[in-house]
Amino acid sequence: MTTNAKTRYRSWLINLLLILAVFIGIQWWKARPLATGPAPALAGHLLDGQPFDLKALRESGGGRPVLVHFWATWCPVCKLGQDGIDAIARDHALVSVALQSGDERDIRDFMGKEGLGFPVLPDPYGEAASAWGVAGVPASFVVDAAGQIRFSTVGYTTEAGLRARLWAAESLD
């Protein structure tokens, strides 16, 4: 390998590391206001009318972590990840919180139009989002069986990334 090629590869590596550092820094900056430690209370009625309580879901989950996902019908980034959230809901404990997305009928219409079936807790005034420190959507939290927030993220996250966090939270217990 020539000296010129070595210099070029070293330059690419430095640039890649700088881009990675900036990306990690931005993710950290965006996640600063998110709740940490014990998960805040989250209760109400799901779109299907069933009562919901995060604590009860955790206790009945057999020690598996729960994904709490904040989103909005008006959020284009949320739409990119909604199929992944729907897939995760089929095999993991999950509750989604629809932030300021209209009334229950509006959210039901959206879910039907998009062919989504994950459980939704409406948050028309942003009270739950505020308690969890959510200032932007999508935002996701992995809550372990003991009620501790193990991971949180804001912005687009892949299904694989969320599943990896759920797996890691389960492995840490």
Image (cartoon, rainbow, N blue to C red):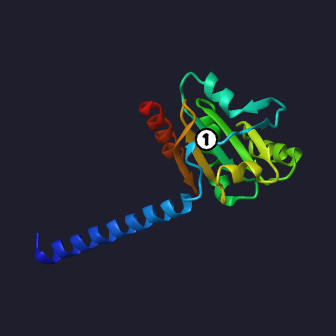
Q: Which image quadrant: the N terminus?
A: bottom left
Name the residue: 60% across, 47% down.
140
Name the residue: 54% across, 31% down.
146
Task: Find disc 1 in the rendering and name its residue.
Answer: 39
Q: Is residue 111 left or right of residue 103?
A: left
* Crowd around label 1: few <14 · some 14–19 · many ≥20 (10 Å): many
Farthest residue to the left: give it. Answer: 2
Q: Return the x and y of residue 104 as percentages of the image width and height.
A: 86, 44
The quarter holding residue 15 reads: bottom left
Q: Return the x and y of residue 143 as percentages of the image width and height.
A: 56, 38
Front-lying residue, 167 or 58: 58
Farthest residue to the bottom: give it. Answer: 4
Name the residue: 55% across, 41% down.
142
Q: Is residue 123 left or right of residue 28?
A: right
Name the residue: 68% across, 33% down.
54
Label 1 element class: loop
The quarter holding residue 68 reads: top right
Q: Is residue 39 left or right of residue 107?
A: left
- Amino acid type of the residue tagged 1 in the rendering: Ala
Q: Return the x and y of residue 40 as percentages of the image width and height.
A: 65, 42
The quarter holding residue 66 reads: top right
Q: Return the x and y of residue 106 as percentages of the image width and height.
A: 86, 49
Q: Which image quadrant: the C terminus?
A: top left
Front-lying residue, 135 or 38: 38
Count of numbered circles in the view: 1
